[in-house]
Image: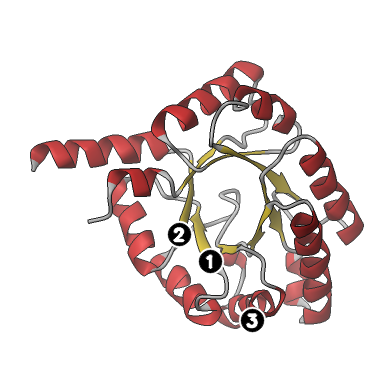
Amino acid sequence: MIELKTLANMVDHTLLKAGAQKEEFEQLCKEADNYGFKMVAINSYPVAMCRNYLRDSDVHVGAAIGFPLGQTTIETKVFEVEDAIKNGADEIDYVINIGKLKEGDSDYIREEMKAIVNTAREGSIISKVILENCYLTDQEKIAVCEIAKEVKPDFVKTSTGFGTGGATVEDIRLMKKVVGETVKVKAAGGIRNLDTALQMVEAGAERLGTSAGIKIIEEYKQLEGAD
């Protein structure tokens, strides 16, 4: 069984809803710090605010880029990354151009990934590539992971949580099989309880994007108490 502290430090504590307000971001940051989560996963606008809330904490601030559809230009995504870095982001999660992938334009996906990952690398921050697997065939998932193996972002990630489906154990295994030890895998979307979280970790996920992190950790504590 994975240790409680280790599991908590895999959680990207998520607040990405359109109407989120200042008090909610402050609460999100307090929760992430109290529970020892790895990151707060937010949109670009509140990055500076959350950086301030977490100025004395080890919790990272993560910015969603090209979120949630991925349908912005490479130049726009790069600017978003640069702006997030300027405002204090430690990590970025960007959505690929799903339409270009489905057209079979792997050169575009590679160019986009290189531009964004290099920008993140220059800013000394962590980069994650969101595939949005619910819209992809297995061959398309493999194609992106093969490109990632070449470009070397820090993570490939299953989902935004805004699509028609989220992370599955099968997808985690497939992605991990392709990237091996070169790139890590993040599971996101639909992870709402301890059992699901542990299944994702067992399948190879090293990060968990979820708005149910507190519930998951409290379930773990109850399980420990029962033992």
Q: Residue at x 61, y 72 (%)?
A: 136
Q: Amino acid at mark 3?
A: Glu
Quadrant containing the C terminus is: top left
Q: Return the residue nearer the eye: 223 or 123.
A: 123
Residue 144 falls left or right of residue 207: right
Pointer 3: residues within 10 angstroms few (<14), some, or many (20+)? some
Q: Residue at x 78, y 73 (%)?
A: 109
Q: Residue 101 sits in which quadrant?
A: bottom right
Q: Amino acid at mark 2?
A: Glu
Direction top: furthest residue: 23
| Residue 206: numbered disc | 2
Residue 10 placed where, x, y %?
Answer: 44, 49
Q: Marks 2/1: CA distance?
A: 6 Å
Residue 203 placed where, x, y %?
Answer: 37, 68
First-in-chain label (3 vs 2): 3
Q: Residue at x 52, y 21 (%)?
A: 27
Residue 207 falls left or right of residue 214: right
First-in-chain label (2 vs 1): 1
- The image shows residue 89, relative to residue 18, as above or below, that is below
Determine which residue is flagged by label 3.
Answer: 146
Q: Amino acid at mark 1?
A: Lys
Residue contact between numbered discs 2 and 1, judged by CB atoms under 8 Å = yes
The residue mark sitting in front, 3 or 1, is 1
Residue 2 placed where, x, y %?
Answer: 27, 54
Q: Return the residue nearer the eye: 192 or 14.
A: 14
Residue 14 falls left or right of residue 73: left
| Residue 184: numbered disc | 1
The kind of secondary structure element at disc 2 is loop
